[in-house]
Image: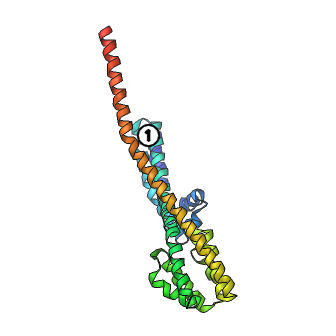
Amino acid sequence: MIRIMLPTMIVALLFLFHKILDPWLICLIRERDLDELLHEDQQSFMLKRVRKSRIALLPLCLWSRMDYSFSILFLILFIYIFLLKKDYWSLKQHVKRKSRLLKFQFPIWLRQLQILLQSNTVSQSLRLSLSHAPALIRHDLKKLIDEIDKDALNITPYLNFLSAYRLSEIERAMKLLYRYNTVGKDDAYLQFNRMIQTTTKWLRSEREEHHKDAMTIYEWFSMIPLFGVTLLFLAIMCEVIMNMFTNGM
């Protein structure tokens, strides 16, 4: 009787003492790059994952009725781990898509800013570019403008701009923009022009990579008819061989 009730007791204990077990489990499964992917509400994000995945353990209560099949146990554990990791994988893919989109949009915005800098200060140019800025950078741009208005000589707001994406080209551009705002504008503007050329190359390479990825997908789709013909050929060959053995017997 105890052997039959043991899986149910374990599941019940996991649900009853979840407040004690959840912090331990969160520390155990926490990914190293989560700080880079998510800067706010990390604790609630982890708790949501743990609570959602716990539902997958309920079928363990019926494990005794399945003759303690290890195949069923592995299936339950697989579903549990999948639910535990699913939100993290989705977040990682979301940040990756945003990073790729930013690599297209940032150089375009930088060119608009360069035009505005010809007749405006850095603060004015950033403010004027806000209405035409891509939605992806608008929040960070508003924050940058507010911090520059408070302290125009502080480099920290420039370095924090879009820092979550950890793109070296953006960091270099913001350092040049800070230099343009504080020291020798002629020299800084020359380097800013060079930065525009660099980001143009960056944009071109991203477009080529995007085109290459799209072509790779189309190539895989083009393999589907060939794969189908191969399966059909194998089926016909198997039928021919079976007919030969049947006729021979």
* Picture quadrant of residue 244: top left
Task: Please report the residue visible at 63 percent of the width from the left and 69 percent of the height from the top.
Answer: 168
Report x, y in % for residue 27: 60, 60
Q: Nearer the viewer, residue 165 or 106?
A: 106
User: Dot 1, how many residues are within 10 Å of its Cα: few (below 14), some (14-19), or many (20+)?
Assistant: some
Numbered circles on residues, count: 1
Residue type at mark 1?
Ile
Q: Who is closer to the viewer here, 147 or 87?
A: 147
Quadrant location of the C terminus in the rendered image: top left
Q: Find disc 1 in the rendering and name its residue.
A: 72
Q: Quadrant of residue 179?
A: bottom right
Q: Quick check: 171 above or below 10?
A: below
Give left or right: position of 155 versus 92.
right
Instruction: Please tell me whether mark 1 sits on a helix, a strand or a loop.
Output: helix
Can the viewer see residue 197 in this picture? yes
Q: Nearer the viewer, residue 5 or 26?
A: 26
- Residue 210: x percent and y percent? 48, 59
Q: Determine whether, in the image, residue 190 is placed left or right of residue 19.
A: right
Res. 249 in view:
no
